[in-house]
Image: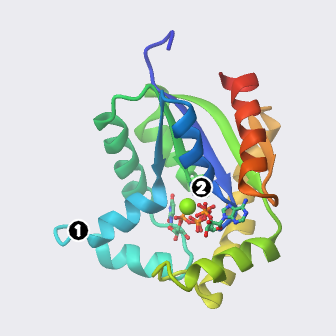
């Protein structure tokens, strides 16, 4: 990049909207992008017997609540610093204003935030995807009770963040309620046009 700072594209959308799936496809095609899923980093941290935050993370995830930003942003920033990539897809973060504030104070102008890639999907579609995945995922939050809580957190806390980027003219809107390859065709076009 011109500035030498890493570029960051936040990837947002409801639970089951397809963030992880599409990020996987993006990094196959755009070799200079790395994918960091905040949820995956938290799940890995929860497994680490040396972590003092494991219990807290488990409880928050099962309840669909947003983990304190100090934990999440440290995992993200550490992973960014370990990576050679110059462009990052940060998947599933920031989920609320506190997350965005925590990002500003820890990372701030050490990275260049391009905006957000927003996967827009109706709740009933997300719900059936997650229930289907729940048959085999082993994820503690892929059950109807946790899914409902995740949806509520998404509407109350995360949608305002998406609107924030939208008002800045920095939100790429993707219709996510379609087959994976059709969604990706739009993603590819948007990345080439907007940020390529
Ligand atoms: N699928 C995907 N795309 C499809 C398509 N186009 N057509 C048909 N099926 C499609 O996809 C979900 C399922 O749908 C899969 O089975 C897939 O094959 C299928 P996926 O790509 O995994 O969707 P994604 O949006 O990534 O769903 P995910 O469940 O990961 O979303 P969440 O946002 O709920 O999960 P995340 O891992 O980001 O967060 C989990 C929890 O961690 C949060 O609830 C919270 O408690 C905590 N968290 C924080 O506290 N802070 C953070 O910053 C991040 C997470
Ligand atoms: Mg995901």
From the top left corner, tell me how far across and down residue 58 is, in percent. Answer: 39, 78
Residue 131 rendering spot, x and y as whole percentages: 65, 83
Q: Is residue 104 above or below residue 153?
A: above
Residue where numbered disc 1 is placed: 48
Q: Position of residue 140 (x, y in %)?
A: 47, 83
Residue lying at 57% horizontally and 51% vertically, measured from the top left: 94
Horizontal side of residue 51 vs 89, given as left or right: left
Q: Is mark 1 within 8 Å of ligand 1?
A: no
* Residue at the image position 42 percent from the left and 50 percent from the top: 73
Residue at screen point 56% across, 86% down? 135
Q: Nearer the viewer, mark 1 or mark 2?
A: 2
Can I make out residue 165 in this image? no
- The colour scheme of the drawn protein is rainbow
Rendering quadrant holding ligand 2: bottom right
Name the residue carrying label 2.
21
Q: Position of residue 6 (x, y in %)?
A: 46, 26
x 33%, y 35%: residue? 83
- The answer to whether the residue bearing label 2 lies less than 8 angstroms from the nearest atom of ligand 1 is yes
């Amino acid at each position: 990049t011109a500035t030498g700072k890493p570029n960051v594209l936040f990837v947002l959308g409801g639970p089951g909207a397809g963030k992880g799936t599409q990020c996987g496809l993006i990094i196959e095609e755009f070799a200079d992008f790395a994918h960091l899923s905040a949820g995956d980093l938290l799940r890995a941290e929860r497994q680490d017997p040396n972590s003092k935050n494991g219990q807290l993370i488990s409880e928050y995830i099962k309840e669909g609540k947003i983990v304190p930003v100090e934990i999440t942003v440290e995992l993200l920033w550490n992973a960014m610093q370990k990576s050679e990539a110059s462009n990052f897809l940060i998947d599933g973060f920031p989920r609320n204003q506190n997350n965005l504030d925590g990002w500003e104070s820890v990372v701030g102008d050490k990275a260049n935030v391009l905006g957000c890639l927003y996967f827009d999907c109706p709740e009933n579609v997300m719900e059936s995807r997650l229930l289907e995945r729940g048959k085999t995922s082993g994820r503690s939050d892929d059950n109807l009770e946790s899914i409902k809580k995740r949806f509520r957190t998404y509407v109350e806390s995360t949608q305002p963040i998406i609107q924030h980027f939208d008002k800045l003219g920095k939100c790429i809107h993707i219709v996510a309620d379609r087959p994976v390859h059709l969604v990706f065709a739009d993603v590819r076009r948007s990345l080439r046009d907007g940020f390529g």
